[in-house]
Image (tube, rainbow, N blue to C red):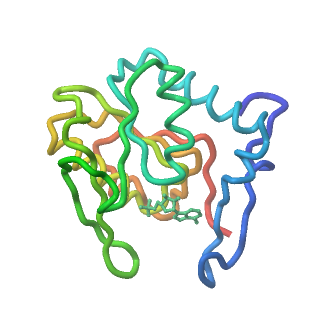
């Protein structure tokens, strides 16, 4: 973290949301502070400038907010990873397990650069299940997942297991209450 700026101060922590026992790390309080949002985007640019990326893939929905300015600043394509049923064209999809039940995400097949290096972005990495599923879709479409990024990481949920083989970067980590 750069001197004089404390990202932790900008992140709202909401206990027992969306259910009892979960501490929710809310990034709306980062977006509403221009200096905090600028700090995040600048830090991402610093991390990935020169990484020879061909595209940035953004996880719905909060991942969109951080991936879009990065794609613009790096001058590379932005690919949306959406919940099943939202994309109108031909897609590649993947279901994965949540704590309760399953979820399914998909990407437009035509947006996946064949042989291209794609960085995956979300606001927060918890179990890593969503990013893993998105990386699998990119691979199925012929791209190379070049790494994963979350503004926030919760390493006590052992996301490094789900994301094995991928380079993981975060701006701040929390280790539980
Ligand atoms: P996962 O697939 O388990 O890594 O879950 C990641 C997704 O769930 C991200 O898109 C996060 O926005 C959201 N998420 C999971 N846990 C939290 C938390 N404690 N606070 C805020 N968002 C969370």
Left or right position of 131 against 24: left
**Number of residue marks:** 0
Q: Position of residue 153 (x, y in %)?
A: 55, 52
Which residue corresponds to the image point at 74% horizontal and 43% vertical from the top-left?
Answer: 7
**Of 35 and 90, the residue lying toward us:** 90
Figure quadrant of the C terminus: bottom right
Q: Where is residue 12 in the image (x, y as percent from the top left)?
A: 75, 59
Which residue corresponds to the image point at 23% horizontal and 35% vertical from the top-left?
Answer: 112
Figure quadrant of the N terminus: top right
Left or right position of 108 against 148: left
Q: Where is residue 49 in the image (x, y as percent from the top left)?
A: 49, 18
Q: Quadrant of residue 130?
A: bottom left
Left or right position of 79 against 71: left
Residue 107, relative to residue 96: is it above or below?
A: above
Residue that sits furthest to the top in the current view: 50
Q: Where is residue 167 in the image (x, y as percent from the top left)?
A: 38, 38
Q: Quadrant of residue 115?
A: top left
Which residue corresponds to the image point at 38% horizontal and 34% vertical from the top-left?
Answer: 119
Residue 35, relative to residue 160: is it above or below?
A: above
Which residue corresponds to the image point at 50% horizontal and 44% vertical from the top-left?
Answer: 64
Q: In which quarter of the image is residue 46?
A: top right
**Of 157 and 133, the residue lying toward us:** 133
Residue that sits furthest to the front in the current view: 88
Residue that sits furthest to the bottom in the current view: 20
**Of 148 and 62, the residue lying toward us:** 62
């Amino acid at each position: 973290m750069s001197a004089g700026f404390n990202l932790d101060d900008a992140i709202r922590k909401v206990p027992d949301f969306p259910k009892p026992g979960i501490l929710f790390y809310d990034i709306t309080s980062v977006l509403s502070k221009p200096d905090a949002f600028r700090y995040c985007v600048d830090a991402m640019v610093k991390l990935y400038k020169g990484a020879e990326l061909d595209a940035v893939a953004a996880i719905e929905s909060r991942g969109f907010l951080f991936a879009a300015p990065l794609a613009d600043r790096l001058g590379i394509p932005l690919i949306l990873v959406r919940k099943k049923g939202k994309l109108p064209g031909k897609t590649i999809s993947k279901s994965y397990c949540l704590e309760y039940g399953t979820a399914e995400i998909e990407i437009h097949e035509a947006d996946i650069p064949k042989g291209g290096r794609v960085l995956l972005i979300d606001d927060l990495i918890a179990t890593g299940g969503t990013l893993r599923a998105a990386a699998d879709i990119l691979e199925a479409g012929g791209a190379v997942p070049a790494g994963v990024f979350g503004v926030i990481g919760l390493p006590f949920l052992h996301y490094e297991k789900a994301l094995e083989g991928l380079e993981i970067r975060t701006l701040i980590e929390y280790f539980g209450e």
